[in-house]
Amino acid sequence: MSEKAGRILLVEDDVGLQKQIKWSLEGYEVIMAGDREGGLNHVRRFEPAVVLLDLGLPPDPDGATEGLAALQQILQLTPCAKIIVITGNQDRANAIRAIGMGAFDFYHKPFEEPILKLVIERAFKVYELEQENRALAARNRAEPLQGLITNDAQMIKICRMIEKVAPSDASILLLGESGTGKEILARGVHELSPRARARFVAINCAAIPENLLESELFGYEKGAFSGAAKQTIGKIEYADKGTLFLDEIGDLPMSLQAKLLRFLQERVIERLGGRGEIPVDVRVVAATHQNLEELIKEGRFREDLFYRLSEITVNIPPLRERKGDKALLAHAFLERFNQTQKRSLRGIAPDALQAIEAHAWPGNVREMENTLKRAVIMADGAQITCEDLGMNPVHAEDEHPLNLRQVRDAAERHAVTRAIARSNGNVAQAAELLGVSRPTLYDLMGRFGLK
């Protein structure tokens, strides 16, 4: 058989039967273990697609307690594996019990080679079909927060918050520095809401001159002003039944703040030069990098408008405060620009990763995106270096302990997030970097709420 036939783990304490089964399964990669612990170690290391599991394992070779316990633990470690249990002719009850616990199939000793091969082939076929279905579902599944890459606890909490508030019609105010991903979150709100089939309309209040912004927002009638040759609807009306994203709302002129407030209160607009009120059903998401409360004190932003816009407020942390996200994003941008720029760089050099993690990134994710794009284009070697990034090498970060319990938890979490980021999400590589086993790393990730 071809290599595609796959890997089988055989957990069987009878050495003679081990050899017989392995010989009959020539063409498959058969890994053998004689007890539950050995089998679990192989599962952690190799993640086999198919497992042949004898229920009568030591220290209970005449019963099924050890085998059933192994079945349960294997399914916890690799739920997708197809487990075929081996039983004696008089042990049908335990075989059925194993099926109820999640085993794929069973067969009795002494085995018949053609039947065993048929069961194994069917197990591999089902495994492959399930993997294909999962991949297809992942490709077809809507990704409302597509483009937001994070492993930081604060950002994950914000994502969960967005998922909760999106189905409502509450106005949302996104606060954060430039380049932190405010528009991505705004689009996520839209895609997760009942308005997802309607339009998402974005307008940057700082990018349009004040004398044009009103007509952009509210539209105008023919002849409303010089050059108004035809009736034109504004962004608010165009977003009817959908979502309106007002970026840099802190730069909205005071004269338009009053008009926007009236719209938010009455849900009607008037086009420039028009006399009739036009009802508009739209969900408003606003964003700014400015401190609106300070602007209110300075008399540059209406307090009543602030409360209308901030029914739900989301504070987005800058990249420098997102633990582990710098290296994670760097890997993601490398993969993206490898494709778009037709390059085949094989990674980021360790000193370059240290420089990336040490840099403050005042321009946040947008700055990193531009930096990595330039580095991918300019790189001469197989990996991105500090020179490609335009950065100087730095020394490893120094730890500053406070007290034993807090430092241990903080250091472990920090080390785990950095290892996952540096290994680009590969758990086996991250465990190797940390010097722990994969189950230990999974336990740490579960404790810290990491994925």
Image (cartoon, rainbow, N blue to C red):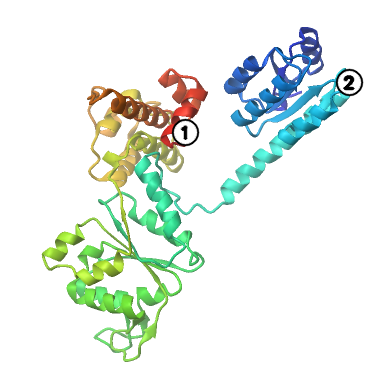
Residue 219 lies, with reference to residue 376, above or below; the image says: below
Residue at 24% x, 67% y is 306
N-terminal-most mark, 1 or 2:
2
Q: Say if residue 449 shows up in the picture.
A: yes
Q: Residues within 10 Å of mark 1 (few under 14, many from 20)?
A: few
Q: Say if residue 206 shows up in the picture.
A: no
Q: What's the amino acid at mark 2?
A: Glu
| Image spot of residue 395 (x, y percent) | 23, 22
Residue 112 vs residue 444: left or right?
A: right
Residue at 25% x, 51% y is 177
Q: CA distance from mark 1 to mark 2?
A: 43 Å
Tell which of 210 and 321 is nearer to you: 321
Secondary structure beneath dot 1 equals helix
Quarter of image, res 107: top right
For the view shown, which residue lies furthest in the top direction? Answer: 16
Q: What's the amino acid at mark 1?
A: Gly
Tell which of 294 and 124 is nearer to you: 294
Quarter of image, res 256: bottom left
The residue under label 2 is: 112
| Image spot of residue 89 (x, y percent) | 88, 22
Residue at 26% x, 61% y is 248
Q: How many marks?
A: 2
Tell which of 143 and 338 is nearer to you: 143
Residue 282 lies, with reference to residue 40, above or below; the image says: below
| Image spot of residue 182 (x, y percent) | 33, 54
Residue 161 vs residue 212: left or right?
A: right
| Image spot of residue 110 (x, y percent) | 88, 17
The residue under label 1 is: 446
Secondary structure beneath dot 2 equals loop
Residue 132 vs residue 438: left or right?
A: right
- Quadrant where the image shows the N terminus: top right
